Image (cartoon, rainbow, N blue to C red):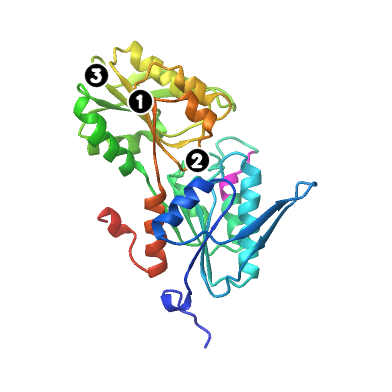
């Protein structure tokens, strides 16, 4: 019998959850949501920086999910994920899903100048070659990253988590709120925020000079004067652009400023930089782990919403062969 029907869910055994070392707290929360243990594995770093993985139990015939964010240290976390996937493949797992809350190299998604790589495509290829059958990720920087994978994936957005929190906890106390998209690249998603929160929208137009992470915020399209501003973006890295955005909306007469973004990368002194801004509150998620130092720097100013239930529920539905779209009335 040659044709194995992959939608026949009886092919797979039980769910086996594995965690890399990038986001242990999030992995544990996902496991708790599913009322399952995290499977035991050993990850050893040899003195020559080579990574070695050993599974403590068999995964033969099982439905395996590897949870690993590819945030800093990016290359270590990415290699660890690839090595774990290959280890599971070689132990005859029936199906392997890479659960990558934050996917690295998402910004390198096109050749926008001569002689440059499309690294997001390379990362997709590497996950497939390692042996992943499926993948799951949250809010990639560019939607077309989905087209770089030949394997099926669940590409989820966490915006509804942020919207729900803002609606229930912040919106009632706001004065004439306006959603501000941190740049034109985020305009479409920003518009969805504004629709969900029932507010007008404004856009910050910024021009980049050169290849470094520094950008120049120039002008604002729309009205923020006398309004509470909710600046939305997908990820915040060094905090430079978002700092300029805050400064600009303040100069344009905004009242209180709130920040909402999916992935808190906060490289270098990003956390300290955000802490120094004249903002009321930051709403983000645990797609990327925030160190105790960063949390301390942002104490009282940050709310971290967990993506564990979302990912846990999608894992459960994927395993049972049920629709994920139903969760969002789609």
- Give the residue pinned by disc 1: 281
Q: Nearer the viewer, residue 158 or 303?
A: 303
Marks 2 and 3 sit apart, C-alpha to C-alpha, by 31 Å
Q: Residue at x 38, y 69 (%)?
A: 320
Q: Nearer the viewer, residue 322 or 47?
A: 47
Marks 1 and 2 sit apart, C-alpha to C-alpha, by 18 Å
Say which label, 3 or 1, has the lower sequence index: 3
Query: Which circle marks residue 288 in the picture?
Result: 2
Residue 298 picture quarter: top left
Mark 2: secondary structure: loop
Query: Which circle marks residue 178 in the picture?
Result: none
What's the magenta region?
Answer: 116-121
Instruction: Give the mark toward the camera: 3 or 1.
Output: 1
Q: Nearer the viewer, residue 251 or 265?
A: 265
Characterize the local packing of mark 2: few (<14), some (14-19) or many (20 or more) Cα atoms within 10 angstroms: many
Q: Nearer the viewer, residue 199 or 187?
A: 199
The quarter of the image holding the C terminus is bottom left
- Residue 227: within the magenta? no
Q: Position of residue 78 (x, y in %)?
A: 62, 48
Is 44 on the left or on the right of 194, as rendered? Answer: right
Q: With respect to residue 151, does 301 lie above or below?
A: above
Is 6 on the left or on the right of 180, as rendered? Answer: right
- Whether residue 207 is visible: no
Q: Residue furthest bottom?
A: 1
Say which label, 1 or 2, has the lower sequence index: 1
Q: Residue furthest right?
A: 48
Q: Position of residue 147 (x, y in %)?
A: 48, 54
Marks 3 and 1 sit apart, C-alpha to C-alpha, by 15 Å
Q: Residue at x 34, y 60 (%)?
A: 324
- Give the residue pinned by disc 3: 227
Q: Residue at x 37, y 20 (%)?
A: 279
Q: Residue at x 22, y 24 (%)?
A: 174
């Amino acid at each position: 019998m040659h044709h194995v029907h992959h939608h026949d869910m009886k092919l797979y055994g039980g769910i086996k959850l594995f965690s890399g070392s990038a986001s242990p707290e999030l992995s544990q929360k996902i496991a708790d949501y599913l009322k399952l243990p995290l499977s035991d594995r050993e990850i050893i770093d040899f003195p020559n920086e080579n990574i070695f993985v050993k599974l403590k139990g068999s995964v033969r015939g099982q439905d395996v999910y590897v949870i690993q964010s590819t945030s800093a240290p990016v290359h270590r976390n990415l290699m660890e994920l690839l090595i774990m996937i290959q280890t599971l493949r070689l132990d005859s797992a029936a199906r392997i899903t890479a659960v990558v809350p934050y996917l690295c190299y998402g910004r390198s998604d096109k050749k926008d100048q001569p002689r440059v790589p499309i690294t997001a495509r390379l990362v997709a290829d590497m996950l497939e070659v390692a042996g992943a059958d499926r993948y799951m990720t949250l809010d990639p920087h560019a939607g077309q990253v989905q087209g770089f994978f030949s394997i099926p994936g669940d590409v989820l957005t966490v915006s509804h988590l942020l919207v729900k929190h803002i609606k229930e906890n912040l919106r009632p106390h706001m004065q004439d709120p306006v959603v501000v998209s941190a740049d034109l690249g985020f305009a479409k998603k920003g518009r969805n925020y504004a629709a969900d929160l029932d507010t007008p929208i404004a856009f910050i137009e910024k021009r980049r000079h050169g290849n470094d992470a520094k950008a120049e915020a120039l002008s604002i399209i729309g009205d923020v004067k006398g309004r509470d501003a909710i600046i939305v973006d997908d990820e915040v890295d060094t905090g430079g652009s978002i700092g300029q955005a805050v400064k600009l909306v303040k100069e344009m007469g905004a009242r209180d400023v709130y920040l909402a973004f999916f992935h808190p990368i906060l490289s270098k002194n990003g956390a300290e930089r955000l802490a120094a801004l004249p903002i009321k509150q930051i709403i983000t998620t645990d797609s990327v782990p925030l160190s105790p130092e960063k949390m301390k720097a942002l104490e009282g100013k940050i709310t971290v919403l967990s993506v564990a239930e979302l990912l846990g529920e999608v894992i459960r539905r994927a395993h049972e062969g049920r629709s994920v779209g139903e969760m969002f009335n789609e």
